[in-house]
Amino acid sequence: MKFKVIVSLLAVLNIAYALTMEEAVELAMQNNHQLKQKEFDYFGAKERTKQQNAAFLPRIDAYYSYNEKNKALPNQNKKESIAGIRASYNLFNGLSDKYGIDSVEFLEQNSYLIYSAAKRDIALQTKQFYIRYLQAVKNESIAHSSLKMFQKHFEDATHYFNQGLIAENDLLEVEVQLLDAMQSHRTAQREVEIAKIALENSIGVKITSEIEDIEVSDEVFDYESLLKNLINRDEIQALQSVQKSVKSAIKANRGNFLPRADISLSYNKYGKDWDLAGLQNPNSQSIASFELSWNLFAGGVHSAQERIYRYEASGLNEQTQALLKDIELQFHRAWSSYLMHKDNLKTAQKALTAAQRNYEISQRQFYEGVLKSSDLITANHLLTRAKQNYYNASYDMELAIQTLKRVAQID
């Protein structure tokens, strides 16, 4: 609760500290309008369940009526009034109420599972925006470092050219590479701006400072266990809840073919005028009643309704099977992406180590006059690309892990 209060205050004041990915997810949960809609749908479903439970409680009514006739028949008064109170209770309704409650409870469960799935989707989406923003910031930092190196190369090349140690075309080559690095840096800066806006839109607040970096998770996953867990996805469980609701609705509908039994107790007071006055005692009575009713024919309405429910149940079963196939495909894609990025990260780490060593050697040889400026530029390019590949592979790996966990619904 303390964490939520802090996050809520920061949402009002805007983000002015190192935001973490977990806090970004919490802000998105609080500010996402679609998620709020799903939450309200769930609250409404809970109220419908309470409404249905009212069928097991007695009903109490108060009533009053006043009649004035143009003429009175024998044993009648020209003016009549009655007021009373009645308590009634249904003893048997073919179990329609019981199965009706079961039906709406399954719909409440469905609404909650839809809400839960939406929360998981919002969490993944926010993590994606968060990681992409980190990735853009890192790429901008690498582009800036590369630009600084090219500026240093150009200063050195200009110095060597003025001393007659290198040809003009070598100096021009360095200048072209410097200008290209400037363009790459500006592009990286724009990508940071776009990624930042996307994250701000997701969490619903402005970010006015840096965000906290992440470490790539070292979690190990078992393919078979994840595959078996797909049946527990909220989306699958939500559809199965609707199927159970329809089956309960079929049983509730069958109650229309059975008799109905009700009891009631009422107290009435009568009068000859609107104010219940004018009659001598006894002018009131208590009535206890038992009523048994049975509908013998309703034009086939209830039979048709059962057939409708059965068609709905069959359609829902097909929808569930199709969704399960889609989720299995999502899983295979996520698993393949996880394995690919895992290998890519290992390769990128080795390439970065090699590129760093190669640049150090090339820089030393350039200052010794053994290496041409074009070779040093190539080494710089290799190092910049290796850095970008390594950090991109790191963030892509974390994205692949988060996506796999969402698809397999791992908390």
Image (tube, rainbow, N blue to C red):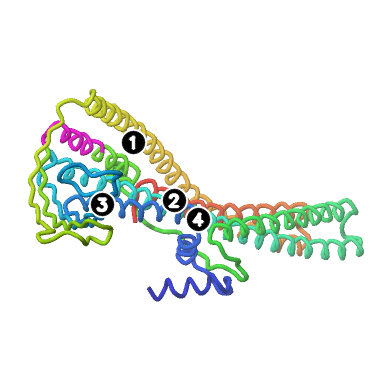
Sequence-wise, the earlier of marks 4 and 1 is: 4
Horizontal side of residue 307 vs 2, given as left or right: left
Measured in 3D between alpha carbons, the distance from the residue under mark 1 to the one under mark 2, in whole angstroms, is: 17 Å
Left or right of residue 169: residue 118: left
Closer-to-camera residue (193/235): 235
Return the mark for residue 324. Answer: 1
Q: Earlier in the sequence, mark 1 or mark 2?
A: 2
The vertical placement of 268 against 71, above or below, is below
Q: Are marks 4 and 1 in contact (CB under 8 Å)?
A: no
Amino acid type indicated by mark 2: Asp
Q: Dot 4 lies on which element?
A: helix
The numbered mark, 3 or 4, whose residue comes first in the sequence reads 4
Name the residue beneath numbered marker 4: 33
Quadrant of the frame with the N terminus: bottom left
In the picture, measured across the screen, residue 198 lies left or right of residue 336, that is: right
Q: What is the spatial separation of the Cα atoms under label 2 and label 4, in whole angstroms?
A: 13 Å
Disc 4 marks a residue whose amino acid type is His
Q: Are marks 3 and 4 in contact (CB under 8 Å)?
A: no
What numbered label is drawn on residue 79?
3
Residue topped by disc 2 = 121
Tell me the element at label 2. helix
Residue stretch rendered in magenta on the structure:
246-259
* CB contact under 8 Å: marks 3 and 1: no
Dot 3: few (<14), some (14–19), or many (≥20) neighbours within 10 Å?
some
User: Tag 3, which secondary structure?
Assistant: strand
Asked if labels 2 and 3 touch by Cβ distance under 8 angstroms, the answer is: no
Foreground residue, 335 or 96? 96
Q: What's the residue type where badge 3 is placed? A: Lys
